[in-house]
Image (cartoon, rainbow, N blue to C red):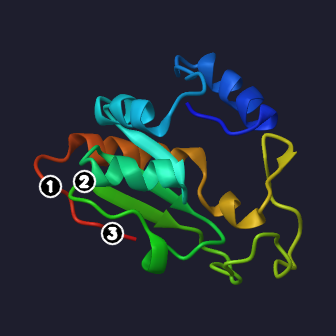
Amino acid sequence: ATWGNNAERERAQLLSRAGVRVLDRMPVTELAGHLSSAALVVGVDSGLTHLSAALGVPTLGLYGPTDAHLTGCRGARAEFIQADTQCAPCVAATCRNYSGPPLSWQQEVIQPPCFATLPPALVWQRCRQLLAARGPAEVVG
């Protein structure tokens, strides 16, 4: 897991309890080396997710407010899941369009709420499919 600030680092540390390795800060060239040897990369619309897809690593991009059809990760072994709320993709930095009840997972409110339509079970299913695929996979949404 990578992180950009202290809050992200704390979340990454929670993932380390499940066997995920949390990387220290390092130059992007060094991160690229780690990404290229990964069995699978799962991430949101970020430079590192795009980089892993470009490197040919099996990559699953999770898209909430951003539009996967416009900026989705691309590569021979890259796929993405687009959030499925009425207001997604809104491409807004801060959610202003969702008007339903608060969406939560394990008693924690999800922000932005569109990510609630990408539950862990769905993400895990798509990860397993991506890892099981033989040869190049199509980019799907």
Query: How dense is the environment of label 1, judged by Cα within 10 Å: few (below 14), some, or many (20 and up)?
Result: few
Query: Callout 1, which amino acid?
Result: Pro
Q: CB atoms at circles 2 and 3 under 8 Å apart? A: no
Percent x, y of residue 118: 59, 57
Query: How dense is the environment of label 3, judged by Cα within 10 Å: few (below 14), some, or many (20 and up)?
Result: some
Between 82 and 75, the one nearer to me in the picture: 75
Q: Quadrant of the C terminus?
A: bottom left
Residue 35, compared with residue 120, is above or below; it is: above
Residue identifier under label 3: 140
Q: Secondary structure at mark 3?
A: loop
Residue 67, compared with residue 134, is above or below; it is: below
Residue drawn at 80 percent across, 36 percent down: 7
Residue identifier under label 1: 136
Per the model, the C-alpha gap separating discs 2 and 3 is 10 Å
Q: Secondary structure at mark 2?
A: loop
Percent x, y of residue 114: 70, 67
Using the rendered image of the protein, determine whether residue 3 is visible from the camera's viewpoint: yes
Q: CB atoms at circles 2 and 1 under 8 Å apart? A: yes
Percent x, y of residue 70: 46, 80
